[in-house]
Amino acid sequence: MKTVALGAAAVLLLATLPGVANPSLLHLLTITFYYVVLATSWNLLAGMTGQFSLATQTFAAIGAYTTGLTVYYLHVPIWAGILAAVAVSLLCGFVLGVLVLRMRTIYLAIATWAFAETVHISLGAAYNLTRGELGLSVPPLFGSLEPAPYFEVFLILAALATLTAWSIARSPLGSFMRAIKDDELRAESVGIDTVRVKIFVFTLTSGMTGLAGAFYAHYVAILSPNIADFSVIGTIITMVIVGGIGTVAAPLIGAPIVETLGALLSRYGEWDLAIFAAIVIVLMRTSTGGIVEAGRRLLSRLRQAQTT
Amino acid sequence: MLLEVRGVSKRFGGLQATRDVSLALNAGEIRGLIGPNGAGKTTLANLITGIYAPDSGEIRLRERRIDGARPSAIAHRGLLRTFQNTRLFGNLSARENLLVTIYAWCGLAAAARMRDEAERRAAHLLQLTRLDAVAELPARALSGGQRALLQLASGFMHPELALYVLDEPFAGINPVFVETILELLEHHRKHRGVAYLVVSHEMEIMRRICDRVAVMIEGAIFLEGSLEEIVADEAVIDAYLGRI
């Protein structure tokens, strides 16, 4: 309860930010919140359940293009486009979950990577439909592209995603997920229906990502296949690992750090990716638990120092 | 009849792991399963618990077919097992390792309702196994003996446990822990009528606890009887006991 109250207070405090912050900071934070949702989704799937998917960005693209295309061609209202986006992402997540059910570790990574790149390339190749790299024009959610209202929307999305992950982590479902990550055969043997749990997590996280992608489409207004670029999953994984893979707080810590660093490094071209890779390698060698684990260790050391 | 294995065979490539195995167990019975390494004991345990589906034959639990069913479905019906090389959820605490069994049985929808009952059972088992001091530690941080005890205890969390297949539960276990294990087995046999199929090489323990013992040699059940009858059998001595 204390954690929820603290989280709610933080969200309310952040919600007042558009009154004082400049638009470029708001834009940076909006994108950060978008990444918090994506990273939370990947963290639930890979960090907690051990299903190392490389297709999270693809579901954002599926959501984004579903609403973009339905609004563009069918002239449906934006809310209907977003609903369709969630439905299509859930369905695709379910189907992918069923297809990769028996795959583990590297095979799962390869299969989801193949799926991700197929969708990515198709989005560019089907330019008659998607306008490819030229970009599909999508109407902005709030008429203008002024970041303040989008900031609030993505703040809510990030908060909801985090709340979802937090509740799952504390529930028996969370134990099942971590059990599957630790030892799938044993999980089956004690009676956990691993098939159902895995498909559920695939479906849920895909829907969550698709929703974020749909809102993202109505924020960037010009949608290109870049949204499904492979570097996106690299960024997501970096965020989660920096934060502390498998912990609910990981995306909240990792996303702002990586986004800010990316913004600072952006004037040097694509060096940010190289630097992220270096950070990940260092973290994997030293503290696989990321910042959360390092913080915990520091806290327990401080407590020990106090008691002695 | 609690468990009925009838004419079960399983082949892996060129190896006939079990051939035409038949076995029957009553509620509350403790059945030993012995035999030389590679005789097919663990394969039989894997067949009974759904890790493999048999090539032929059938397996029934309380008259209902379970061969070919998934391990989780079989576990749901009250047939659980332990693994020879202790398997636990290493990143879950000892307590969570116990709770998972009960939540898996009752399902997520009923989990909230079962919570107090589950916590109570877990606390009781942690106390019985003297693991209460390490209850909040991740299972991977426990000692070998503690891990084996925890693995065993996790099965007793199942509210409808009927048959517990134990694969080498005493191998490499400190004698102090062995006594605790035996107490646990007897307690649940007496109060809940749990039956056990125990795969073990520990003849002294088998003699103490097993009503009957089955000897497996080269994938087939060679002989069944009390341990006294079995150790008196010349062929068994030749095939197995004589070699020790």
Image: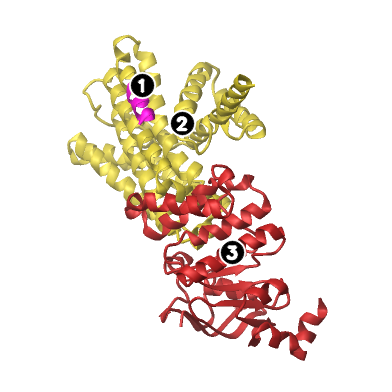
Chain colours: A yellow, B red
Q: Nearer the viewer, mark 2 or mark 3?
A: 3
Chain designation of label 1: A
| Residue B183 badge | 3
Chain designation of label 2: A
Q: Which residue is mark 1?
A: A10
Amino acid type at circle 2 is Ala
Res. A91 visible in picture: yes
Identify the image quadrant of residue A59. top left
Res. B40 visible in picture: no
Residue A75: x %, y % from top left: 18, 38
Q: Main secondary structure of the magenta part?
A: helix
Sequence-first tag of 1 and 2: 1
Q: Residue at x 38, y 55 (%)?
A: A95
Q: Nearer the viewer, mark 1 or mark 3?
A: 3
Q: Residue at x 59, y 78 (%)?
A: B31
Residue B217 appears left or right of A37: right
Same chain? Circles 2 and 3: no
Residue A7 appears left or right of A268: left
